[in-house]
Amino acid sequence: MTDLHRLSIREMSEGLKTAQFSSRELTQHYLNRIAKIDTQVKSYVTVTAEQALAQADAADGLLKSGMAGILTGIPLAHKDIFCTQGIKTTAGSKMLDNFISPYDATVVAKAKEAGLVTLGKVNMDEFAMGSTSESSYIGATGNPWALDHVPGGSSGGSAAAVAADLAPIATGTDTGGSIRQPASFCGLTGLKPTYGRVSRYGMIAYASSLDQGGPIARSAEDCAYLMDVIAGHDLKDSTSVNKEVDDYVAKLNSTAVKGLRIGIPKQYFNVVGLDADVKARVEESLKKLEEMGATLVEIDLNMTEAYVPTYYLIAPAEASSNLSRYDGVRYGYRCENPADLLDLYKRSRSEGFGAEVQRRILIGTYALSAGYYDAYYVKAQKVRRLIQQDFLKAFENIDVIAAPSAPTTAYKIGAKLDPVEMYLGDIYTIAVNLAGLPAINAPVGFDASHLPVGLQLIGNYWSEAQLLSIVHQYQQNTDWHTKRAAIAEENA
Ligand code: GLN
C-alpha cells in the first residue's frame, strides 16, 4: 500500500486489527517516507529505525494474539524535549548534544505501554524558547507548505513531521503557544491541555509553572486518541492533578455546538499586526460555527496589553532557574581545558547555550535579582493573577473563547531577527499558559500565499473533551483538516 499515511488514527487502528497491514509495514512505510522526504523538511533530530521496527514486531505479536490495545502498532514522533531512555534527548541544544536519559518521560512511557511505535525525536527551538524552531542548534526545520518558511515553534519539528506525513501524530509541549502556533502554521490540530493534566515528569523544563505536553495531529479525533494515552495523574510530577480523566474519543460528540456560547474578545481582533487574511479566515470559521448553531458573544479581555510583558518576565525568570542545572559539571556540554571552576561554568554555559537561551537567562536572572525582584517578578505574578481573573470572569457568561492562534501565517526562515518582534507574535497564546487553561488550534483555511490559518478555542479548566468535541464537529462539517501540502502527497 502506498497511501497508508493518508489514514486517520482510527483507520490505522482498524487496518491493523483486521490485518489489512502489519505494524511493521506501517512503520516501514513511515521510515521510507522519512528517508526520502525529511532531507527537505528536516523535522527529525534522531530517527530510531531499528528500535521502531522491533517495537512494530512486538506490536504485531500482540495484534495476532488479540492482546492489542487501540493504538498498538501505530507510529508516532516525540518532541526532542521528552526524555527517552537509550535514545538521545537534545532539547535542540548543544548543551545536551549526546545526552542520553537514563529514564523515559511519563508521556513516553505511557505511549510505549499503549503499544505506540516511536519513529524518532523531532526538532524544536532550543529548550523550547522560540516561535520558529530556528534556534535549534541542529538547524531550522522547513514548513511543509513552503519549505523556505518556518513551521512555527517551539514544537516545529512535531508539526512539520505530521504535516509532511512523516508521522501520523506527534507529542509537543506548550509553555506559551508551542503546540498551538506550529499547529496553526502547518495546518494541523493541536491541543494544549489544562496545566496539570499531562505529566511533566521527564519533560525537560523551560518554565515549570507554564509547561504542558499535548498532541499535534491532523484532526481533533486523532488528538483525542493520543490524549487518552498521555493524560492523567502522575505521582512523579507534583503539579500533575489527581482528577478523573475524560475518555476523549468517546466524548468527541458530547458537546452540542447548537446553543454553544462563543466569546469573541473585542481586544483580540484589534491587535496591531493581525494579518487581514488571518482575521478573515478566523471570522469565516466563526460564521460556520454560528451556522452550526453557536452564538457569538462579544466579550472584554481587558488585560490583553499585559500578556507579552508578563509572560516575558515569568517565563525567563523560571527558565533562568531551571537552566542553572546545566553547569558543565554533572552532565551536558563541558568546555575544553577549564582554567578553574568559574571558567568551567562560564565557558560551558556560553559555549553550550545559543543566543536566545542566553538572552532569556539574562532577562530572568535580572528580574529575579535582589534589587528588582519586587518591581519585576512579583509584579508580573500579580498581573498574572489579574489575567487569570479576566478569563474566569468571561467564562461566567460564555462556554469557550475564540481567537486566532497567531497574528500571521508562517513567515520566511530568517525573517524575524528582532526578538521583540517575535515575542509580539505570541500575543494570542501566552495568556492561556499564564492562566493554566486548555486551548486548541484547528486549521480553518489559507491566506493568499496558500499558507494555513488557525482558529484557537480557549476553554475553562478541564474542558479538553469539550474543545476536542467542538473541533471534531467543525471538522465533520468542513474539510480544512484534510488538506495536505504538496510534499505530503509525494510517495516514498
Ligand atoms: N514562543 C513562546 C516562547 O518563545 C512560547 C514557547 C513555548 O510554548 N515553548 O517562549
Image (tube, helix red, strand yellow):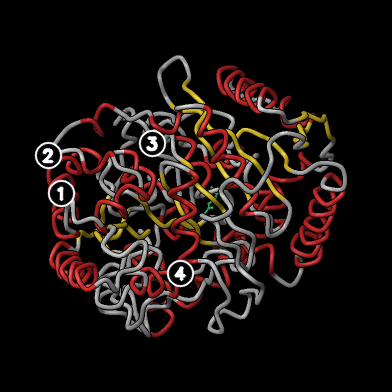
Dot 1: within a 10 Å radius of its alpha carbon, few (fewer than 14), some, or many (20 or more) residues? many
Residue 79 placed where, x, y %?
Answer: 37, 58
Precedes in sequence: disc 3 or disc 2:
3
Residue 480 placed where, x, y %?
Answer: 45, 28
Give the CA distance from mark 1 to mark 2: 8 Å
Q: Nearer the viewer, mark 1 or mark 3?
A: 1
Image mark for residue 204: 4
Q: At numbered mark 3, what does the secondary structure look like: helix, strand or loop?
A: loop
Q: Quadrant of residue 97?
A: bottom left
Residue occupied by mark 3: 150
Image mark for residue 29: 1
Name the amino acid type tagged 1: His
Q: At numbered mark 1, what does the secondary structure look like: helix, strand or loop?
A: helix
Q: Nearer the viewer, mark 4 or mark 1?
A: 1
Residue beneath the point at 42% across and 78% down: 327
| Residue 258 versus residue 232 in the image, above or below | above
Mark 4–mark 1 CB contact (< 8 Å) = no
Mark 1–mark 2 CB contact (< 8 Å) = yes
Mark 3–mark 2 CB contact (< 8 Å) = no
Name the amino acid type tagged 3: Val
Q: At numbered mark 4, what does the secondary structure look like: helix, strand or loop?
A: loop
Give the CA distance from mark 4 to mark 1: 30 Å
Q: Nearer the viewer, mark 4 or mark 2?
A: 2
Give the CA distance from mark 4 to mark 2: 34 Å
Name the amino acid type tagged 4: Ile
Mark 4–mark 3 CB contact (< 8 Å) = no
Residue occupied by mark 2: 492
Precedes in sequence: disc 1 or disc 3:
1
Name the amino acid type tagged 2: Ala
Q: Quadrant of the N terminus?
A: top left
